[in-house]
C-alpha cells in the first residue's frame, strides 16, 4: 500500500481553506497538518481542527527555524491565506525550498485573468508565483472562478436572503458574459484530485461546476422559485468609474484594508463582465488545464442543484463569522 502524502495546510479556518481541509479528509489519501498564527491557536475554529486529531502548528512566518520544523517531511504545502495577506506567503518559500517540498499550491483560488494589469489581487498572487518559479519549487496553481455561494440573486419573497452575502441583484453590462463558477464545497474535492496528479505539476488548473452568465443564473432562479427576479443594471461605464474611484481611494492610503477590498471587488467586476476574462476560452488561451477534462469521473455540484438547496434552507451563509 502506497504511503500517504503529507500535506501542510495554511489558512484552514477560512472559507476556501475549510473546503480544502474537508476535501483532503474525505479523500483519505493524506496525512494532514495545519499551520496557523500563534495568536490563533486558542480560537474555537482552530480548537475544532485539533479536536479532529489534526496536528496544528502555531508558528510566526518570520521564524524560519520553526518553519523548517513544520515543513520537515511535508510533500505538499497548500496555502489558502486571505487576500490581504497574500504577500506573507513569500516568507514560506525559502524554507519550503530548503525542506525539499515536492509541490507547493500557493493561494490562487480566484477567477481566471491575465497575470499583470487586469486585477491588483491577481498581480499580487502572480508576484508570489514568480518567486516560487525563481526558486525552482514544484508548484500547481488552482483557480476556481467565482463561487455559487456569492453568485445568486435575492428573491422578492426574501426566501434566500438568509444565505446571501450581498443581496443587491445587479446585472453587469448586458448580463451575457459567461463565467466559470464552482461550488465552494467542491473546491476541496478538486484539490484532493489535483495534488495527486503528476499531469498538474508546474501547471495552472481551473475547476468549474457550471459556466453561466448572469442572465442564465437569473433564469434558473426564476424557474426554480416561481418568482420574478428584479435587477438593477450597471453599465460598462459605471463599472470602469468604480474601478477608477477605488484606485484613487487606495492611492491615498495603500495600507487601508477596506480600500484594498473595495478595489479587489471593483476589479473583479471589470475582469468578469467587461474584459470577460473568467471563461474557458481565456483559460485555454492562458495555458490552464481543465480539471473537468482531467477527471471525467468527477461530478461536481451544478448551480441548479445548489439553488435548490438554497430554496430549501439548506445552505450555509459564507463569511457568516467575519
Image (cartoon, rainbow, N blue to C red):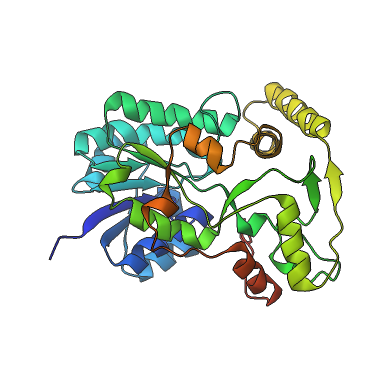
**Residue drawn at x 20%, y 39% as measured from the top left:** 99
Tell how many labels.
0
**Would you place residue 124 above or below residue 172 in this image?**
above
258 left or right of 12 in image: right
User: Which quadrant of the figure has residue 162?
Assistant: bottom right
Residue placed furthest toward the bottom:
312
* Residue 41 placement (x, y as % from top left): 41, 56
Query: Is residue 175 in view from this perspective?
Result: yes
Residue placed furthest toward the left:
1
* Residue 204 placement (x, y as % from top left): 41, 39
- Please state which of residues 118 and 129 is positioned toward the viewer in this rendering: 118
- The quarter in which the C terminus is drawn is bottom right
User: Which quadrant of the figure has residue 316?
Assistant: bottom right
Query: Is residue 42 in view from this perspective?
Result: no
99 left or right of 172 in image: left
**Residue drawn at x 80%, y 42% as measured from the top left:** 174
**Residue drawn at x 72%, y 51% as measured from the top left:** 214
* Residue 31 placement (x, y as % from top left): 25, 60
**Would you place residue 112 above or below residue 38 in this image?**
above
- Please state which of residues 1 and 131 is positioned toward the viewer in this rendering: 1
- The quarter in which the N terminus is drawn is bottom left
* Residue 246 placement (x, y as % from top left): 73, 30
Amino acid at each position: 500500500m502506497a504511503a500517504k502524502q503529507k500535506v501542510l495546510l495554511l489558512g484552514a479556518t477560512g472559507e476556501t481553506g475549510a473546503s480544502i481541509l474537508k476535501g483532503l479528509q474525505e479523500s483519505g489519501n493524506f496525512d494532514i497538518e495545519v499551520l496557523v498564527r500563534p495568536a490563533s491557536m486558542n480560537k474555537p475554529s482552530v480548537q475544532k481542527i485539533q479536536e479532529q486529531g489534526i496536528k496544528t502548528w502555531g508558528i510566526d512566518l518570520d521564524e524560519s527555524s520553526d518553519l523548517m520544523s513544520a515543513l520537515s517531511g511535508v510533500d505538499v504545502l497548500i496555502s489558502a491565506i486571505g487576500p490581504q495577506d497574500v504577500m506573507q506567503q513569500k516568507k514560506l518559500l525559502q524554507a519550503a525550498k530548503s525542506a525539499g517540498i515536492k509541490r507547493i499550491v500557493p493561494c490562487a483560488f480566484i477567477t481566471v485573468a491575465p497575470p499583470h494589469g487586469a486585477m491588483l489581487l491577481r498581480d499580487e498572487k502572480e508576484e508570489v508565483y514568480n518567486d516560487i518559479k525563481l526558486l525552482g519549487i514544484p508548484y500547481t496553481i488552482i483557480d476556481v472562478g467565482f463561487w455559487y455561494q456569492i453568485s445568486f440573486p435575492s428573491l422578492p419573497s426574501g426566501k434566500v436572503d438568509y444565505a446571501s452575502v450581498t443581496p443587491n441583484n445587479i446585472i453587469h453590462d448586458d448580463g451575457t458574459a459567461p463565467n466559470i463558477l464552482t461550488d465552494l464545497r467542491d473546491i476541496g474535492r478538486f484539490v484532493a484530485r489535483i495534488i495527486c496528479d503528476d499531469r498538474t505539476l508546474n501547471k495552472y488548473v481551473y475547476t468549474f461546476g457550471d459556466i453561466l452568465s448572469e442572465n442564465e443564473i437569473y433564469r434558473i432562479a426564476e424557474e426554480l422559485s416561481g418568482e420574478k427576479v428584479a435587477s438593477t443594471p450597471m453599465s460598462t461605464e459605471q463599472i470602469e468609474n468604480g474601478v477608477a474611484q477605488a484606485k484613487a481611494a487606495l492611492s491615498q492610503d495603500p495600507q487601508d484594508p477596506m480600500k484594498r477590498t473595495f478595489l479587489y471587488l471593483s476589479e473583479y467586476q471589470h475582469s468578469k463582465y467587461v474584459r470577460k476574462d473568467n471563461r474557458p476560452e481565456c483559460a485555454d488561451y492562458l495555458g490552464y488545464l481543465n480539471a473537468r477534462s482531467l477527471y471525467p469521473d468527477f461530478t461536481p455540484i451544478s448551480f441548479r442543484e445548489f439553488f435548490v438547496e438554497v430554496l430549501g434552507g439548506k445552505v450555509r451563509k459564507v463569511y457568516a463569522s467575519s
